Image: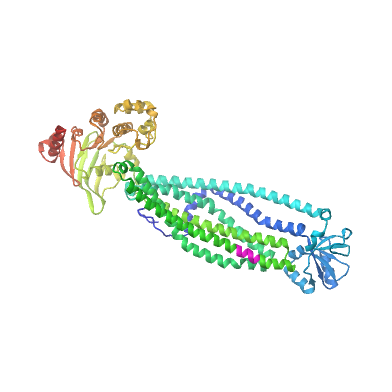
Amino acid sequence: MRNNSFAEDEVGGKLYDRTLVRRLLRYVKPHRKLIFLAMFFMIITACVELLIPYLTKQGIDNYLAKLYQIYTAPADVCYELVAASPDSLDFMPLAVDTTILVRKAALDRMDPAGRVQMERDGELSRETYYLFPGDRFNGETGSIMNGHWLVPERELSKVPLSVIMDVRGGDIAGISRLAFILGALIILSLAAGYGHVMTLVVAGQRSMYDVRTELFRHIQDLSLKFYSQNPIGRLVTRVTNDIEALNEMFTAVLVDLIKDVLLIIGTAIILFILNVKLALISLAVTPIFILVTVIFRVKARGAYREVRKFLAKLNSRLSEDLSGIKIVQVFRQERRRREEYRETNVSYFSANMKQLIIFGIFRPLIEVTASIGVALVLIYGGGSVLSGALTIGALVAFISYVRQMFQPLSDISQKYNIMQSAMAAAERIFTILDTKPDITDSPTTDGIDLTGGIEFEDVDFSYDKDNKVLCNVSFAVEPGRSVALVGPTGAGKTSIISLLCRFYDVDSGRILLDGRDIRELPVRNLRDSISIVLQDAFIFSRTIEDNIRLGLDLTREQVRLAADMVQATPFIEKLPQGFDTVMAERGATLSTGQKQLICFARALAHDPRILVLDEATSNVDPATEMLIQNAIGVLMQNRTSIVVAHRLSTIQKADQILVIDGGRILERGNHQELLARRGIYYNLYLLQYSQSNDA
């Protein structure tokens, strides 16, 4: 697999990739008992499907169409045939030693070599007869021979129904027995089919649960650089649609494909056992089927992957538009965004239509091919029935088996579609799983209790090779002290925080925490020691209490205490359920200031050694800012603090202020020292002071 962004989903790859399938089977292996059980049920259903046409043949030949033909041959040949099965009534002597009655079904059961020898030694009549006792002869049809009433097949309607029912009571009983057996087999097939489906679905769902869990865990571990290169909508598609495509492959292809192969092989064997010539004739359409399948594969390959590509684009655009719906509505961009969405939707629709057209042509071609095979069987088999070379039951069974053989072939074509989608989905999923996090723990890392001493030593950093964001940045913050970062937008202030939290690694230089390079510390240990309050306060769709606790094992009293300290309790208690109020997505029902206060309470509840405030008060109105200034003071007590702010009023009490521009530290000192220097900081202070007076 190759690491790349998902700016575009490529169309390519194989229909069947052994490496991908092997990796997918790793998720199935823990549930192999269910898979084996599903295969057991599948074998039962396949055997029943193969058995039913044969039982139908037996019923027709032995009970419904109990027909005889007159065979004329030398006396010794006739005697030998009768003596070979004296109790079966397959060969019955007539008055003349050179003539016997031969049951038509017996010819079908004979060894081919014996049948050829029989045809060579004598002559078989083309006429077929039903056999009744001679004492039931009514004189309207047929003739008496050696105590038997021979009724031509075409004149059976002239025999009274009462005679048929009376004489053929044994045949009716036989049919009843076969019907009972068939009913039992059908019930067995239904039970096995249910077990097959249920075990397979459960195994598939459990396997996909494992894939989904691993994929989500891996995405969480990926670095921020990955998210800057990959739209969120596409990642959502990977975790939802693509995994569902894999699940469909597991449940519809993995075991069912084995069943289809068994049915094809089993049916072919039975066809050749029944009649070699007819089997070869029925399989004469196989080259047509292969040709159609090859053409379908070539045409469909790109179409399936195009569908996956445009689906990912559609999800990506939808996610982006819904996330930015406020901006879209404020700037009245609904029409333009609808047009862009329509273009993507049209592309997705066209890709789907192309896929449907290809499959819509292919499926009927398979049906036509199967019908041609059945037609050939009817033409040749019908002639064989008329000539006495084949029984009616054998012909009926042959037609059923031919249709049964082409049905799995048609199903395999359907599974081709599923395999296309699944392989494309697997490529994308494993591309993400093969993407290595940029930030990993060193093999020698070990956790320590941090006090919060921070030191940057000659740090250089860039998001891409051409543009440096930080150049030779060096500063130190003693444990429990504070530093403020000031400078214009794009100066590199937020990048310093990102490097400290190790969202990225430095290009050169070192960042030390309590004297140790942060790359030597476990990432979890490092981030457990840091709490951040960002300019864009993020609220989860959970209760207020859960948003403050955020996974920590805190009591309601501890959560309330944190909210009290940042003065968030008054507005929280005014909510419908207080701390148990469930927030809308991203806290849409709260004001910006209220969301910020909850984030302050969250930071305080986590009791970090290092506190980072990144423009945390920039979106807060002056009245709310006054409320939380004291809370900030409480938060910063005995904690190493880094404050990023444009409002200089919020950082005047910082122990050290760094003025940054162009990725370099241009001035440093406390508030009074920088004012006395009358440099960049002094000018910024005068500018904000004059603006506040004008206001």
In depth, the one of 628 and 632 nearer the eye is 628
- The stretch in magenta equals 371-377
Place of residue 601 in the rendered image (x, y in percent of width and height, measured from the top left):
31, 31
> Does the magenta portion include 374?
yes
In depth, the one of 528 and 305 nearer the eye is 305
Indicate left or right for 233 with 397 as reference: left
Indicate left or right for 637 with 428 as reference: left
Place of residue 426 in the rendered image (x, y in percent of width and height, measured from the top left):
45, 53
Q: Is residue 451 visible?
A: no
The image's colouring method is: rainbow
> Does the magenta portion include 71?
no
In the image, is residue 40 above or below residue 140? above
Residue occupying the point 47% across, 46% down: 210
* Magenta highlight: main SS: helix
Place of residue 447 in the rendered image (x, y in percent of width and height, measured from the top left):
34, 40
**Quarter of image, res 695:** top left
In the image, is residue 545 above or below residue 128? above
In depth, the one of 525 and 608 nearer the eye is 608
Number of residue marks: 0
In the image, is residue 464 above or below residue 544? below
**Quarter of image, res 140:** bottom right
Q: Quadrant of the N terminus?
A: bottom left
Residue occupying the point 23% across, 54% down: 466
Q: Is residue 669 visible?
A: yes
Place of residue 35 in the rendered image (x, y in percent of width and height, measured from the top left):
56, 50
